[in-house]
Amino acid sequence: MAYINLNGVALATESGGTVTLDNGVAQASGFTLGSGVTFPAGHIIQMNYTRNVDMTISRTGDKSSVVGTGVTCILANDLQASSKLFAQFTTQIGEQDGSHWAIQTFMTLFNNSVDLAPYSSATNNEGAGLGSASHVHGATHAQYQSANVAGQILFTPTGSGAARRTVELGWGSTSTSSFVSRLNRSDNVSTSYRSGGTTILLMEIAQ
């Protein structure tokens, strides 16, 4: 075993080819960690946040296929090989009044074009989306209503580069009924029924 001392203070020790810094070593201001640094499991390596208040995003017709809304959040740096991503969203959706009888519109997230909360009619639509909402037909005038929907998921990202560190908010329905769904607002055009927006929080988590 070898020791390195600086002015009588232990700086580092070597044993079996491994060099260990002493507990008393302080990191200098402006010091940059190398790309090979290993963080403890659960450590947040990087994060980003986006907020979208676009009132023109909508979808109509048969919505049984899940598609993206165009609202995305991307991390600045490439991910470590073993990292997972934690994504959380909040959004507000409205829909037109009609005869679709409170059919659910559900929200999900995509990573590398993969739906992170897929469903199948073979399993009775279990697990469709990360959150959903509907409006009662007729009696409560659905066009004036909007609902807050939130969801979150910890997952192993796929792909490479920017696709690997990007999530996109998606939406769909477990029914083929045709009706208009709107993001960030109610269906009514009056500005009196516009409020809120969509937020996405994305974190890289060390494993």
Image (cartoon, rainbow, N blue to C red):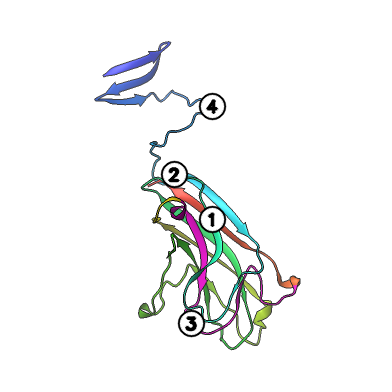
Going from N to C along the chain, the mark reached first, 2 or 1, is: 2
Going from N to C along the chain, the mark reached first, 2 or 4, is: 4
Where disc 2 sits, the SS reads: loop
The amino acid at mark 4 is Ser
Residue 175's tag is: 3
Disc nearest the viewer among 2 and 3 = 3
The amino acid at mark 2 is His
**What span is colored magenta in the figure?**
162-190
The residue singled out by tag 1 in the image is: 73
- Between 171 and 18, the one lying in front of the other is 171
Going from N to C along the chain, the mark reached first, 2 or 3, is: 2
Going from N to C along the chain, the mark reached first, 1 or 3, is: 1
The residue singled out by tag 2 in the image is: 43
Q: Residues within 10 Å of mark 4 (few under 14, many from 20)?
A: few
CB under 8 Å between discs 3 and 4: no
The residue singled out by tag 4 in the image is: 29
Q: Position of residue 176 (x, y in %)?
A: 49, 83
Disc nearest the viewer among 2 and 4 = 4
Where disc 4 sits, the SS reads: loop
State how far apart marks 2 and 3 are (Cα).
40 Å
Image-based side of 101 in relation to 204, left or right: right
